[in-house]
Amino acid sequence: MPVDLRLMRYVVTIAEEGGFQRAAERLRMAQPPLSRQIRDLERRLGVPLFHRRPTRLTEAGEAFVASARRLLADADSMIELVRATGQGQSGTVRLGTVMSAAHETAPELLAALRAAYPGVTVQAREAWSGELDAGLRAGRFDLVLGRMIPRRPGLTRQTVRREPLVAVVGTAHPLAGRPVAALSDLYGSRLRLVPGDVAPDYRSAILAALARTGLEFEVDDCEVLGWRHLGLADGKGFALVPSSLGALPTADGVTLPLADHLPAPDLELVWRRDALPPAGAAFTRVAEATARERGWLEAAPTGPPA
Amino acid sequence: MPVDLRLMRYVVTIAEEGGFQRAAERLRMAQPPLSRQIRDLERRLGVPLFHRRPTRLTEAGEAFVASARRLLADADSMIELVRATGQGQSGTVRLGTVMSAAHETAPELLAALRAAYPGVTVQAREAWSGELDAGLRAGRFDLVLGRMIPRRPGLTRQTVRREPLVAVVGTAHPLAGRPVAALSDLYGSRLRLVPGDVAPDYRSAILAALARTGLEFEVDDCEVLGWRHLGLADGKGFALVPSSLGALPTADGVTLPLADHLPAPDLELVWRRDALPPAGAAFTRVAEATARERGWLEAAPTGPPA
DNA sequence: GACCGGCATACCGCCAGGGTATACCGGGAT
DNA sequence: ATCCCGGTATACCCTGGCGGTATGCCGGTC
């Protein structure tokens, strides 16, 4: 039963060379062992593969060679595929992305990955922080791009982007025309913030940063159907978002760079150290290179362009 | 490079059993060599296939197993196909058939072959004797069904059907209504016969048989666009054909069994002893069985049904 | 019939692959 | 923490299969 690939190579080579001697030369071996292998193979199959003198394939031999050629080619391409998969040049990454990165940062990373590793496919899903964390632990995500993902044992993280917060106000807001604002200018407006059950750590980080400025704001929870739906139409509230998100044009909001250099929580890639597929490792490498190229790791100035 | 089927079986089994120990049991071997084989394989590939403790496939391992399953299945079905081909249960026969057998005998043989060896395909071609002989020598036919094929060294033959000659006359012939005729009744009619350059041995065999009866007939060559086109419409000629062919209904001819038991040349299967594909051998076995079942080998009586 | 090209047979040596014994590692229970 | 235990890795040995060399055998050719 065990007809291994070596024997298939033998038969195919004999067929191609039209004789045992020339085949043996091409196979870098002597002719007698080759003859013996074929004889034993024919015995095991119960079927002659070659006519001898002159050496010609039997009909069964033709069938053998045809199948063997396919098998050998398949075996070769298989080890190529396995190698590529193992080195992250092929395969799949399931990526979870926080909303504030889904519009600018994640697409740039994916484009860079596509350029460097065309064989890798990414299944990206947008989710709020709690689901990112849970999905990571449950194995639904290989890799997560988020802010303030809880630190747990077994999780590895890599900072991808460090950026300041900017303010967003409705077009009806008194400050809507300004090129830049200080936090103190916003005093009296209500701060619209993501609810605590969605991203508790993120929320408390923002509040802590504000507390350090010495200013106190009243806070409204906003519906979190994406960062752009902040309920600012009444002109009385404002939101604080990472600058890359604030840079996106919006229908009902105006972005105000902050004179106070208030850092947003770092955008990080997080993964389970013991469950990162090779393509995921490739992703982290690409992310690191991209972050460096774009200067995402030095906090950018908040002010308006000079 | 040499990743043989044995290693593939190992990896697949470990994946299926979920561990090295159980896999080793199913493979009827000890666990340590299995571990070593996998380790060496992983080294050669440069890629780990399993996470250990607990034993789980890596992404590369998944790719390996998927490909390996296909390859193993293909290898199995391949040896089945080769065996079947070698034993004549599969494959192709190129059959050359003389016209006088193409209408009744050959179809029956093909039906029997189809029943016994459904995997065999037959490429049947109708041809006159000279082309049958030449095609056999040139390797265009594996097997030939004909009459009076020249005996040559290296050719093997097997009689398939032995039958009497019957007369065919035009509907306008004086004997057209008779249930049976003697050769002496036909005296004065012209014998229409296949030309000598088409089937010389067949022609001379007929003439010799007639000579033995003591009667002499005048002979016309007929156009040999098949046996039914004998040019009998004028009511003056007659032809002699094997009874199985005479039994076919025809528009312009009437069959007359002969009271004289005149044997037609035997219908034989002929092949080159050194170039009979396995499926051809199967054909000869089927032909022998069929001939025996139908009683084709005892010369049938010539007279009308009692 | 003598020669020659090419496959088969006989016999030998080596190493890959499998066996046994045992160490190691991680997880769970006490 | 410690011990135990299931499960894998390591170390070492041994055998059988595979390839090597020498030579026989067969068929085709002159």
Image: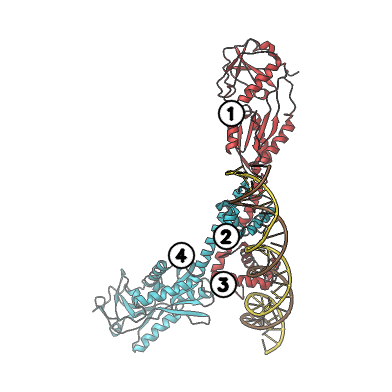
Chain colours: A red, B cyan, C yellow, D brown
Q: Is residue A193 visible?
A: yes
Q: Amino acid at mark 2?
A: Leu
Please state which of residues B119 and C29 is positioned toward the viewer in this rendering: C29
- Corner quadrant of residue A155: top right
Rate crowding at label 4 as few (under 14), some (14 to 19) or many (20 or more) other CA atoms within 10 Å.
some
Q: Which residue is mark 1?
A: A128
Chain ID of residue with mark 1 = A
Q: Helix or strand or loop: what does disc 2 sit on?
A: loop
> Residue B245 in the image: x percent, y percent?
35, 74
Mark 1 to mark 4: distance in Å?
A: 61 Å
Q: Is residue A247 visible?
A: no
> Residue A147 in the image: x percent, y percent?
65, 28
Instruction: Judge depth for marks 2 and 1 and give the one in front.
Output: 2
Mark 3 to mark 2: distance in Å?
A: 25 Å
> Residue A266 in the image: x percent, y percent?
69, 27
Mark 1 to mark 3: distance in Å?
A: 66 Å
Name which of mark 2 and mark 4 comes first in the sequence. 2
State if disc 1 and disc 2 touch (CB < 8 Å). Answer: no
The disc placed on residue A43 is 3
The disc placed on residue B27 is 2
Name which of mark 1 and mark 3 comes first in the sequence. 3
Q: Helix or strand or loop: what does disc 1 sit on?
A: loop
Q: Are marks 2 and 4 in one subunit?
A: yes
Q: Amino acid at mark 1?
A: Trp
Rate crowding at label 2 as few (under 14), some (14 to 19) or many (20 or more) other CA atoms within 10 Å.
some
Q: Quadrant of the N terminus of chain A?
A: bottom right
Please state which of residues A291 and A192 is positioned toward the viewer in this rendering: A192
